[in-house]
Amino acid sequence: GNPGPYQVVAADGTRPAWRPGSFDRVLVDVPCTGLGALRRRPEARWRRRPEDLDGFAPLQRGLLRTALESVRVGGVVGYATCSPHLAETRAVVADVLKQFPEADLIDARPLLPGVPALGDGPDVQLWPHLHGTDAMYLALIRRTG
């Protein structure tokens, strides 16, 4: 069959095997504490410690940096994680954006029509009690230069 106009590459963002600026879109679904999935995996709360947040932080930031380097100017990166913790969501995005002045947050809320209570944006934090999902986070970042 015809694969269509899109080509998907699934790869390890810590060891990119492509040139910078190679992609129009990159989705980086970072490893995290998984605190957002406790409703499905309640036992995980006993396996996590506060210092686990620190362990994931450098990897999350590194993967987001690689993703931004991997999109062309005008390209978009989606940063996603299954955590509601600010240390794994907004803090990661804010820190990396400080290093990437040629990148801007895009309002992700219009891309989720019909989903209520999406907050002030431009990023989105979903919650089990409001959305019936895991506590998933999404930020969309456009590379502007």
Image (cartoon, rainbow, N blue to C red):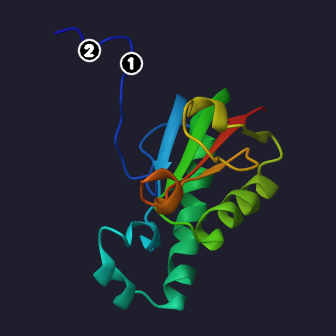
Q: Residue at x 74, y 63 (%)?
A: 95
Q: Which residue is mark 1?
A: 6
Residue at image point 49% right, 84% down: 52
Q: Which residue is mark 2?
A: 3
Image position, residue 29 (x, y; %):
45, 52
Residue 9, given in percent of the width and then of the height, sits at 36, 35
Q: Label 2 crowding class (10 Å Cα cut-off): few <14, some 14-19, many 20+?
A: few
Residue at (49% x, 51% y) in the render: 131
Give how far apart the Cα atoms at labels 1 and 2 are.
7 Å
Quadrant position of residue 53: bottom right
Name the residue nearer the viewer: 3 or 113: 113
Question: Is 58 positioned to the left or the right of 106 in the image?
Answer: left
Specify the quadrant of the image occupied by residue 74. top right
For the residue labelled by badge 1, is the local secondary structure a helix, a strand or a loop?
A: loop
**Element under label 2?**
loop
Q: Contact (CB < 8 A) between labels 1 and 2? A: yes
- Is residue 36 visible to us here? yes
Q: Amino acid at mark 1?
A: Tyr
Farthest residue in the left direction?
1
Residue 21 lies, with reference to residue 83, above or below; the image says above
